[in-house]
Amino acid sequence: MAAGNRTALVTGAGTGVGKAVALALLKDGYRVALAGRRKDMLEQTVKEAGANGKNTLVVPTDVGKPDQVAALFAQIKEKFGRLDTLFNNAGGNAPGVPFDELPYDKWQAVVDVNLTGMFLCAQAAFRMMKEQTPRGGRIINNGSISAHVPRPGSAPYTATKHGVTGLTKTIALDGRNFEVVCGQIDIGNAISPMTERMAQGVRQANGTMAPEARMDPSHVGDAVVFMANLPLDVNVHTMTIMASKMPFVGRG
Ligand SMILES: NC(=O)c1ccc[n+]([C@@H]2O[C@H](COP(=O)([O-])OP(=O)(O)OC[C@H]3O[C@@H](n4cnc5c(N)ncnc54)[C@H](OP(=O)(O)O)[C@@H]3O)[C@@H](O)[C@H]2O)c1
């Protein structure tokens, strides 16, 4: 595939990790579709990249809504003709509360975006990659350190991120016959709106509050570009990229 013809979709491209990945893919020469609910944030990413309307497609989308995801992929097909990489990134969290106090609606809101949204985008990408010529493509799911270990009071986030790992493994298996490849990146503490509170202090497993180290999200952008640029007969199945000094290894 000629460098300038590679096409990617980044969900949640208006902020944090998704923005850093969209910027990195655009810098590498990809044509990038940017999805998220807030149009102004997506347009800001395009502006910061110094990109133009020829290489980018901004589509305000709620990834938890099947009709909106279908419309997003129809626009990608119409404008770019194909999709080589999906960075399945849009995600959300709920305020940490004791497990027995978690309201149903908070649980459901996280499931809607972190699991249903990831499923809907992955399924639409899978279908498009299977049908297109040349056939195939790569789906990179954004998991988390929470796909491995929980933080206190994080049932919806931790459960959905463990679910993302199941989705990654299933797509990697079901995609084999169609050149559809699937890998997962598990991030720990990249600077983003979601991790603002970590600089102030977050609850630790022993109940104390402590600030945690964070890292520049541009490193995640570089990592995703590396994964995306591999030939389709090679896959980074999982990658963990984290602030070196955050609590994870060594049980603290
Ligand atoms: N930062 C980290 O250290 C870290 C660590 C592990 C995993 N992650 C994962 O990285 C992803 C991005 O998180 P972030 O840290 O960059 O935080 P963030 O800035 O809050 O990003 C979340 C993004 O998802 C979008 N989004 C949320 N709900 C959506 C929906 N229903 N439909 C479409 N877009 C939606 C948001 O845009 P709109 O509000 O405009 O829709 C926003 O751009 C998440 O999946 C998160 O779990 C991050």
Image (cartoon, helix red, strand yellow):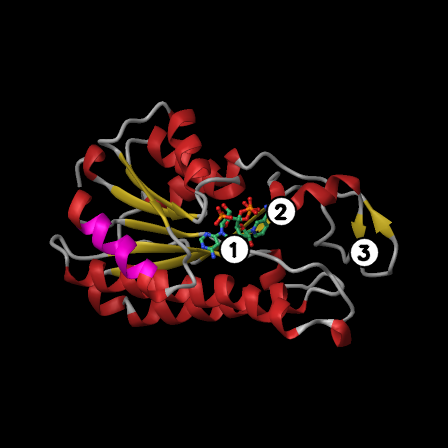
Kindly identify the amino acid type of the residue bearing the numbered disc 2. Answer: Met
Mark number displayed over residue 194: 2
Whether residue 176 sits left or right of residue 131 in the image: it is: right
Mark 3 and mark 2: Cα distance apart in space: 17 Å
Write the start and end of the magenta stretch as one range. Answer: 68-77
Q: Earlier in the sequence, mark 3 or mark 2?
A: 2
Q: Nearer the viewer, mark 3 or mark 2?
A: 2
The percent coordinates of residue 129 (x first, y second) are 22, 58
Q: Which residue is mark 3?
A: 204
Verify CB contact (< 8 Å) between mark 3 and mark 1. no
Mark 2 and mark 1: Cα distance apart in space: 10 Å
Q: Quadrant of residue 216?
A: top right
Q: Which residue is mark 1?
A: 91
In this rendering, is residue 39 above or below 130? above
Kindly identify the amino acid type of the residue bearing the numbered disc 1. Answer: Gly
Verify CB contact (< 8 Å) between mark 2 and mark 1. yes
The percent coordinates of residue 136 (x first, y second) are 21, 57
The percent coordinates of residue 245 (x first, y second) are 72, 42
Mark number displayed over residue 10: none
How packed mark 1 is, by other alpha carbons closer than 10 Å (few <14, some 14-19, many 20 or more), is: many
